[in-house]
Image: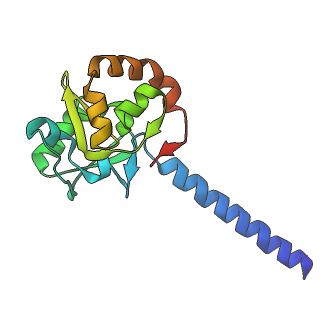
Amino acid sequence: MVQTFRTLLLAAAVALGTLALAVFASAGEFNEADGAAIRGYDAVAYFRENRPVKGSAEFRHLHKGSTFLFASAANRDAFAADADHYAPQYDGYCAFGASRGYKADVDPAAFSVIADRLYLNYNAKVQRDWLADPPRFIREADQRWPETRATTKVFR
């Protein structure tokens, strides 16, 4: 009886461990919420419409293991042709946070396109701070990002 219980516990532990590894392994490089990068907003629309536009599961593209959603097939196709151009900087984490050396979630409405690159921020207040000196913050984020990218803690 004790041996059977131990065997069941071991089997359950192995199953949970395998499931955890599968979930971890399926995570993409970008900050995702509810299974989509940019909280499901269309990365290309920031450039073409200068505003956040919610994407649709009908128009999706997998990039570096992360799912991006788009409002149209044209936007999806543009992203697929040049994903590194349209994808948000710092893997879709808050650009201001990256400049300070930490990962933070984003509000898709708190964005800026600077030098033809998409930068997202935690919220409107953080975006105002970011917009006070984008060149400095971009320089600092670029310097810190390789180390920050490796961290697992994300401010939500």
Report the front residue among 75 and 116: 116
Q: Position of residue 71 (x, y in %)?
A: 14, 52
Quadrant containing the N terminus in the rendered view: bottom right
Q: Quadrant of residue 20?
A: bottom right
Count the labels in the image: 0
Say whether residue 138 is left or right of residue 43.
right
Is 121 rendered above or below residue 19? Answer: above
The quadrant where residue 115 appears: top left
- Given the current orientation, which residue lies at the most extreme right position? 2
Q: Position of residue 81 (x, y in %)?
A: 20, 34
Q: Is residue 75 above or below residue 134?
A: below
Q: Is residue 65 above or below residue 54?
A: above
Observer able to see residue 58: yes
Q: Residue at x 33, y 37 (%)?
A: 126
- Depth order, front residue of 1/55: 55
Tell me if residue 100 comes above or below residue 20 in the rendering: above
Position of 50 with respect to 153 (left or right) is: left
Residue 84 visible in the picture = no
Place of residue 88 in the rendered image (x, y in percent of width and height, measured from the top left): 29, 35
Instruction: Give the left or right position of residue 70, taking residue 14 as reference.
Output: left
- The chosen color scheme is rainbow
Frontmost residue, 71 versus 134: 134
Query: At x 55% / y 41%, what residue is drawn?
Result: 152
Residue 28 % position (x, y): 43, 44
Residue at image position (78%, 71%) is: 9
Please tell me which residue is depicted at 39% across the width and 41% down the height of the picture. Answer: 30
Q: Nearer the viewer, residue 84 or 101?
A: 101
